[in-house]
Amino acid sequence: MLKNTGFCDRYIIMKNWQKEYSKSIRNIDEIPSHLVDKDISSLKRVSEKYPFFSNRYYLNLVSNHPELKPVIIPDERELEDNTGLEDPLGEEIDSPVPGIVHRYPDRVLFLTHNICPIHCRYCTRKRILGKNVNFGKNTWDRGIKYIESHKEIFDVLISGGDPLLLNNSEILYLLEKLKNIEHVGLVRIGTRVPAAFPERINSELINTLKQFIPLYMNIHFVHPLEITEEVKTACLRLSGAGIILGAQIVLLKGINDNVETLKILLRELLKIGVKPYALFHPDNTRGTAHFRLSIDKGISIVHKLRGFISGMAVPNYMVDLYRGGGKVEICYNYIKSKDGDTYEIENYEGKHFEYR
Ligand code: SF4
């Protein structure tokens, strides 16, 4: 059992991240007892279907801040949800070769493996987390060939699992191959690592990544409590190396579905050099119904942010449609009426103005 030592003590960024990662917790019995307020056997049943996993840094953060508990601690409601879909985004339908999802005209998702710094309970790819999914160099090479032979592909998003948990030589291999494809103009890394396992952002990784700038990185955050000194250091090291950082946030019932929490998160992100890029409505993934909120509530939250905090801090609110429909931005409608070329437009305070 991990001792609850009041882990507010500074966590030291370790150079040997593999050693630290190898100490990650998979066993429900090792979760601090104050985070398990229900019958432990029911959590074990949940974890058999949807494995529990956390590195020690994040588990200690949750141990200190139980507000973050729903992010990683199994919940028996996961087994009760039959409404969601195993593959809500239809990634398998849009996969021309293993590991590649090609849905939009000029961009592909490149899945590298299914290993993560933590298992987020609301994950869209819950179906493959902790399962033995066959990614590897042969699969990557097939994906690279696919991209080489499709000249319309401009933008490659490397994701997973988490690509920053590959070792440096693997990251180097992938980035070299992708950056050398002439028609690929944009390579992005989608990652949870800087927010959930900051000790991975060491000098060797920075030296590997900075060879490939311009390089974009979208970091997944869900709560301001995730922005610790270690995370701040990790993000500043990445941006200091020239990597362009954005944040993608999942809007989650019971974690961040209120204006105040999001306001703090969005502002704190800007302070550490991370531009809030997307706020995702939770996907309709099986086992995650307890995280879902209505789109109306999401619109109302964003409406109460826009205009009230810096425009730089407000992300696009996106819904990813079922079965490959793709991402759509959902907005409050500020246009209240139109008469010829005259519009009646509402401002952020709810006042109406005529605009020709
Ligand atoms: S890090 Fe990303 S892919 Fe991994 S469990 Fe969390 S949401 Fe899913």
Image: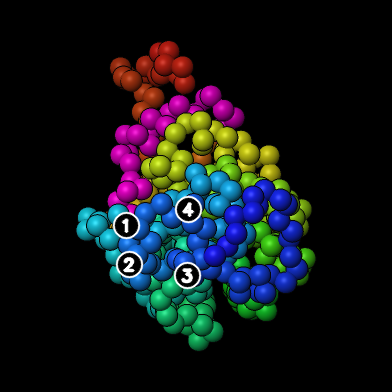
Q: Earlier in the sequence, mark 1 or mark 3?
A: 3
What amino acid is labelled 1 in the image? Glu
Q: Which of the marked residues, 2 or 1, is nearer the chain's N terminus?
A: 2
- In the rendered image, residue 116, in percent from the top left (x then y), is placed at 52, 67
Q: CA distance from mark 4 to mark 2?
A: 17 Å
Kind of element beneath mark 4: helix
* Label 1, label 3: how far apart the Cα atoms are: 16 Å
Looking at this view, is 64 or 305 the one in front? 64
Residue 83: image location, x then y, percent? 22, 55
Circle 1 SS class:
loop
- Bin the neighbour count of mark 1 within 10 Å (Cα to Cα): few under 14, some 14-19, many 20 and up: some
At 30% from the left and 51% from the top, the residue drawn is 289
Tag 3 near tag 2, CB within 8 Å: no
C-beta proximity under 8 Å, tags 2 and 1: yes
Ligand 1 neighbours mark 3 (CB distance < 8 Å): no
Query: Magenta segment, which residues?
Result: 288-313
Looking at the image, which residue sits at the far left? 82
Residue 155 part of the magenta segment = no
* Residue ID for mark 1: 76
Marks 4/3: CA–CA distance: 14 Å
Mark earlier in primary sequence (3, 2):
3
Q: Amino acid at mark 2?
A: Arg
Disc 4 or 2, which lies upstream in sequence? 4
Identify the residue under disc 3: 27
> Mark 2 sits on what residue?
45
Residue depicted at x 32% and y 62%: 42
